Amino acid sequence: MLGWTRSLGRATAAAAASAVLVAASVTGAAALPDSPVSYPSGASSTLAPGLGFDTCTAPSIAALQAWRASPYRTVNIYFGGVNRGCAQPNLTAAWVRDATATGWRLLPTYFGRQPSCMLGSKPYRYTAANATTYGASEAQDAVAKARALGLLPGSALYADVEHYDRTDASCVTAVRRYVSAWTTTLHASGYLAGVYVHQDSGLRDLSASYGNATWARPDAVWMARWDGSPSLTGWPTAPNAQWAGHQRLKQYRGDHNETWGGVTLNIDSDSLDAPAATVARTYRVTSSTALNARTGPGSAYPVVRSHAPGSALAVMCQGLGTRVGTSSVWNRLSNGTWVADYYVSTPSSTTFSPTLQRCMYPGQVTSATPLNARTGPGTGYPVTGTALPTGALAWVMCQKAGTAVGTSTVWNRMLDGRWVADYYVSNRSNTTYSAPIPRCP
């Protein structure tokens, strides 16, 4: 990563007592390797496809506006970590708001402690003895920093794990322990867990432990292989069946200059089909009377509060609900409540707006064999499309009762319109509905 060659930023001390508490909670985490994400009500995940770039210092908003002329639509941000290089004068909550308003998606990367056998000069490192503690405490610090920037729960946060010496067996164990603790701690806080790895070290070792119940599996992998190919399949050190559900990124070209819109930046180039940051966007109430915010996407749900005409709303994502005016679209706000989109100044008053993500609550597939997706919520519906391999993310939009599978009659409708049995998706419950996923209309 570009952070390799930049000057070291000021180190921040970890809170030891807090780390012990978090590490204790990690030890008791259930259902490894596919631990559930505890999404709060103000959560949703964001899917980033296409091309992106990373540069050591977050660019100015003016530079990002100029780079709308580029093929890139996602920009990486180094938002924390004791080994982070480069000052970040631009990286504030206001910058995050303005960058996303300009149309950029964000890929948050945390440059924390590195394996003791790292092939480089970063000074802050972990060993097999303390990797779990540091993985947990640094994940906790990442959550705090993400929240301060306005990166909402449901966002994916990526731990930077640089290239290391795989002949050191203890160091390999340390990496697995660190990534496992990073993953379960982020999941407990409502965030998805990603990891940046070299194809010949971290990716090999996480691939080898993909189904191992000793360690939690991260939700997404970002591989460094500077071969010029943006392909997200056919990787030599991880089979296509691993991280197969919109869970892959590749840094395919290293340190180089590009110029777009008259602005030159030094970047790495990335290909993405994976979770990124979720950020709320501001819109206005357009109704002439107060707009009710409800507990769910429909007029039958209880009213939580009302928003005056013209008032600002922090819209996080959109989902389907009961029809209001010309639209069945409802907006989920960053406080977890829902408002009818027909009365909000989003670009469309009839359907989903392309500038906003769908409301999604991904969970990893837990079945030992690929999970069939169907055209409806039950085993009587036809199987459609490709089955989801073990560990793939099921991008769940809503839940509905269907035929019983295992201990549950709940079925999940995914982003692509297909349905999978909830019993085989890692979330808060495998017996009933899981908050805050809404019911399907």
Image (cartoon, rainbow, N blue to C red):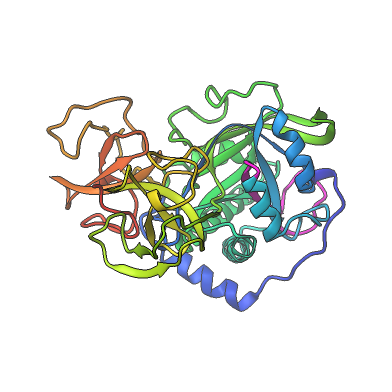
Of 409 and 303, which appears nearest the observer?
303
Which residue occupies the extreme right position in the image?
7
Please tell me which residue is depicted at 32% across the width and 59% down the height of the picture: 428
**Does 365 lie within the magenta span?**
no
Place of residue 235 in the rendered image (x, y in percent of width and height, measured from the top left): 56, 25
262 versus 298 height, above or below: above
Of 129 and 138, which appears nearest the observer?
138
Query: Based on the displayed image, in which of its 4 quarters is residue 132 positioned?
Result: bottom right
Does residue 352 show up? yes
Count of marks overlaid on the render: 0
Please name the predominant secondary structure of the magenta segment in the image.
loop
Question: In the rendered structure, which segment of residues is drawn in magenta?
Answer: 102-125
Place of residue 223 in the rendered image (x, y in percent of width and height, measured from the top left): 62, 35
Specify whether 323 is left or right of 156. Answer: left
Which residue occupies the extreme bottom position in the image?
17
Quarter of the picture holding the N terminus:
top right
